[in-house]
Amino acid sequence: MQLVRDADVVLAFLESHAQLPSALRARRIRPFATTPLAMIACWLADDLRRLPATERRRLAGRYRGVDLTMVFSANQIDVLIDAGFHEGSVEAIPFGFAPQQHPPVDFGTRDSSIVAVGFDRGRDYTTLFEAVQGTDLHVDLYCSEGNIAASRLPENVTFHGVVPYDEYRAVISRAGIVAVPTSEMAYPSGQTVALEAAATGACIALTSTPALLEYFSPATALLLPAHDPRAWRAGLLRAAGDPAVRERLGSAACDHVHAHFTYESMWRHVDALFRSRGWVREG
């Protein structure tokens, strides 16, 4: 409790950690009653939009003591406000990655392989499997078994499971194409892998969702429609067969994410939001 008393602001990183301090602040229990409460929410907007209106209000009510909610894409703001969050209390910040962990890699050292990585609940590997089935494309797949439980792997997809972090870094650093197929979620599903792979200079193939379009454009990634195996097949075949396309997109994405989406940039935005509300003492 002393840490809360001495703090300028309490920050809950992810919504699950905000519910208890939110309840204490809403009930004006000290020291939470006198200390601003902020949270960074990842999945909350997606959870809310799947619920009936009465359930949305009930879930949103658990965060009534939160003064500032930060989300990783602006499209989530209206979802939260519609559920009962106050105007001006929800702000978008950019997600970030650690540049020292994912430095640029020379294009000439990459092979022409396609890798698909990630086990977020938004992944849509079924579309990817249908896209590559019957082609000469080969995909190395790194995810949990739960991500593919309802799917049948084509012969040209090799499943590796979940691997240690250092192996993951090596995989995205040498791949010709890193594929991140997702369903359309409210949050930017797949952004961690997309940003980290892009940081190394890999060519990224992404599902074109409203949230991810805040991070990538046609100039920095191969953007493909959700649940459209034919479009994914055409896009992957084109990129796999054209090294110039892969190098151009990879280079542009590398420059873009290092300039705009590092951890430093993310926390700079958080700090600016706190200061704009007068929560942070100078010095």
Image (cartoon, helix red, strand yellow):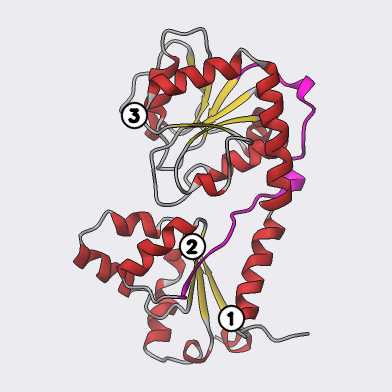
Q: Is residue 158 visible?
A: no
Q: Quadrant of the N terminus?
A: bottom right
Span shown in magenta: 88-113
Looking at the rendered structure, the secondary structure element under dot 2 is loop
Amino acid under label 1?
A: Val
Amino acid under label 3?
A: Ala
Looking at the rendered structure, the secondary structure element under dot 1 is loop
Q: Are marks 3 and 1 in contact (CB under 8 Å)?
A: no
Q: x and y percent of residue 67 in the render? A: 47, 79
Q: Which residue is mark 3?
A: 149
Residue 35 magenta: no
- Tell me which numbered mark, 3 or 2, is placed earlier along the sequence: 2
Amino acid under label 2?
A: Leu
| Residue nearest the viewer, comparing 188 with 21 | 188
Q: Are marks 1 and 2 in contact (CB under 8 Å)?
A: no
Query: Seen in the image, is 161 located left or right of residue 83?
Result: right
Q: Is residue 190 visible?
A: yes
Residue in the picture at 41% in, 55% down: 43
Alpha carbon of mark 3 to alpha carbon of mark 2: how far? 27 Å
Q: Which mark is residue 14?
A: 2
Q: Is residue 50 above or below residue 278?
A: above
Q: x and y percent of residue 251 in the render? A: 73, 33
Q: Quadrant of the C terminus?
A: bottom right
| Majority secondary structure of magenta residues | loop
